[in-house]
Amino acid sequence: IYAAAAPTPMLLCAGKRDGTFKYEDFRRALPHIRKGYAAAGAKEKLAVLVENVGHKYTEGMYRRGTAWFRRWLGGGG
């Protein structure tokens, strides 16, 4: 389903110790998502951020996410 979103820009954040959304499932799906984005000619529009955390949104995810949205949606501040 995620691959079907291509070529829409997408940032995927995952925690390796997430007990809600299992990292192993994410890891298995990721090659298929990358393949879909590559087939759409949009590899640069897919970003993945994995941290060794549980189910949480970290400062690193915030910083990378903010930069990601600025790049693809524009805007400042």
Image: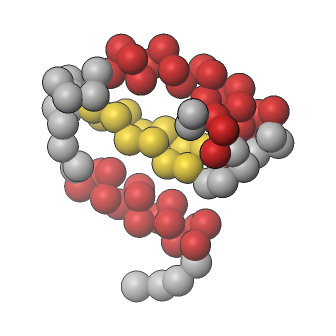
The residue shown at (20%, 29%) is: 20
Image location (x, y in percent) of residue 37: 71, 37
State the image quarter where residue 13 is shown. top left
The residue shown at (23%, 55%) is: 59
In this picture, is 69 found above or below 59?
Answer: below
Q: Nearer the viewer, residue 5 or 9?
A: 5
State the image quarter where residue 27 is shown. top left
Image location (x, y in percent) of residue 3: 63, 35
Image location (x, y in percent) of residue 65: 41, 58
In this picture, is 71 found above or below 24?
Answer: below
| Coloring basis for residues | secondary structure
- Disc count in the image? 0
User: Is 24 displayed left or right of 2 in the figure?
Assistant: left
User: Is 57 displayed left or right of 13 in the figure?
Assistant: left
The residue shown at (22%, 49%) is: 58
User: Is 55 displayed left or right of 64 in the figure?
Assistant: left
Which quadrant of the figure contains the C terminus? bottom left
In this picture, is 61 found above or below 25?
Answer: below
Residue 42 visible? The answer is yes
The residue shown at (62%, 22%) is: 32
Which quadrant of the figure contains the N terminus? top right
Image location (x, y in percent) of residue 56: 18, 43
Residue 44 visible? The answer is no
